[in-house]
Image: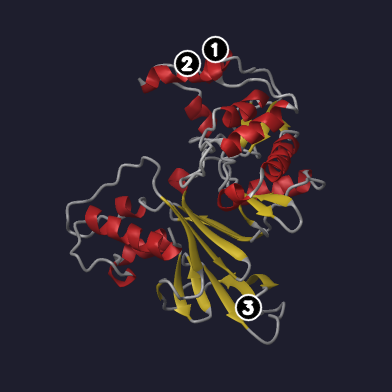
Amino acid sequence: MTPLEQYHRVLDTLRVLKNEPRHFHTVEHVPMKSRAPMFGLTTISNDSWLIGDRAVLTRRFGEPWPTDTLNLISTWTASDGGYYAIADAPVIPPPSRPWKPGDGPTLIHLAGGGGTTIDAGDGDGDDDAGVAQLTTKCVYSIGDVCIKMHHTIHCDSTDEHITIKEMSKHLPNRTFALPAVLYHARYDARYFLVTSRIPGEMAAQLWWDFDDAAKDRYANLIAQACVEVATLTSSKLGTGIDGTAAKNGRFSEALTRKDMPDILANCDAVNLSVQPPFCFFHGDLGPTNVLIDRRKETVGIIDWQAAEFVPREWIGVNFARALAMVQDPPIPENYLSNDYAQRVWRALQRRGFGNDGSVWLSWKRIDWQ
């Protein structure tokens, strides 16, 4: 599905949920209060955009931005020949209109609420809180950067910019690429992040074009990245890199069952050690979050908002059981949707990960029946 098709699909869903008339298929008809929460940015001009309502992204051609630019936060030169700057917005933000395709930034990802109950309101058009939660993450691309917006109710752990900066500091010799943080902010139940774009293409897009040797080569690089990240340890289970508790952490969700909230006891029941140190793990290392640079034969990893400290063996279980790591159709004949996950799992086994998650799966299935 193209970004434009995703865009119209979300708008159509919003129309249905809000009982809007059939003309609610253009961005101009999105309720004003929902525009910034939904889409993350609005358009000021052909070369200027408002991120949330507290930062302005501006592009110009010809010469770089001077370092004394008013309220400057960051600046960079992009491969499109433009010079970009992010600056604090005035107290009263400049007039802007809702973003729409063709405005410059390209919408590259939309994520739904992951089970959030959407409150359709009473039909008077005033209750946009539930509608705003429908699109819990938007990601745009422009000028070699990505602009991301999350609703904080769905942020899994420590703010992503903290995780990226800490890993960059503590893993200077890592074999995988990380984005650089250019801007971040958290307000009005929203989290904004602007990062450099990592070179390469998503593994999900490339995987079936590779032969077996190439698939195994990149699977080894991903497994090696897991091992390197796991060298960051903590005595606290289920926290982010700064020790913040992961309130919506994926590990705690996976290690609980109905009427069984004791995570430590549950770990013991499924053969996961609860003895520290615990190892840092991305938490959502599916093929959409791995970027492959075919020219350099390297990988980069994005979307660190779910990262937390877990028992070391849990890293292998994620791949052995393909937790959120299956490929979307179409899948070539004679391949399985978990081909990516299984290749990384085999590479992890060669690095000493032995728990295949079979005990955990039998234990967890009781709640799924």
Name the spot of residue 125 as percent of width and height, x first: 21, 60
Point out which mark residue 118 bears.
Answer: none
Badge number at residue 363: 2
Residue that protrudes farthest toward the front in the picture:
333
Whether 163 is drawn above or below 334: the answer is: below
Task: Tell me the CA gap for discs 2 and 3.
Answer: 58 Å
Instruction: Give the position of the C terminus as an image quadrant.
Output: top left
Secondary structure of the residue carrying tag 1 is helix
Residue 269 is marked as: 1
Task: Please state which amino acid type lies under the numbered disc 2.
Answer: Trp
Instruction: Report helix, strand or loop for mark 3.
Output: loop
Q: Residue at x 63, y 74 (%)?
A: 85
Give 59 or 53, whichever is nearer the viewer: 59
Dot in front, 2 or 3:
2
The answer to whether mark 1 and mark 2 are in CB contact below 8 A is: yes
Residue 261 appears in the figure:
no
Looking at the rendered structure, the kind of residue marked 3 is: Leu
Circle 2 crowding by C-alpha within 10 Å: few under 14, some 14–19, many from 20: some
Q: State the image coordinates of residue 45 (x, y, percent, origin top left).
A: 47, 81
Residue 57 picture quarter: bottom right
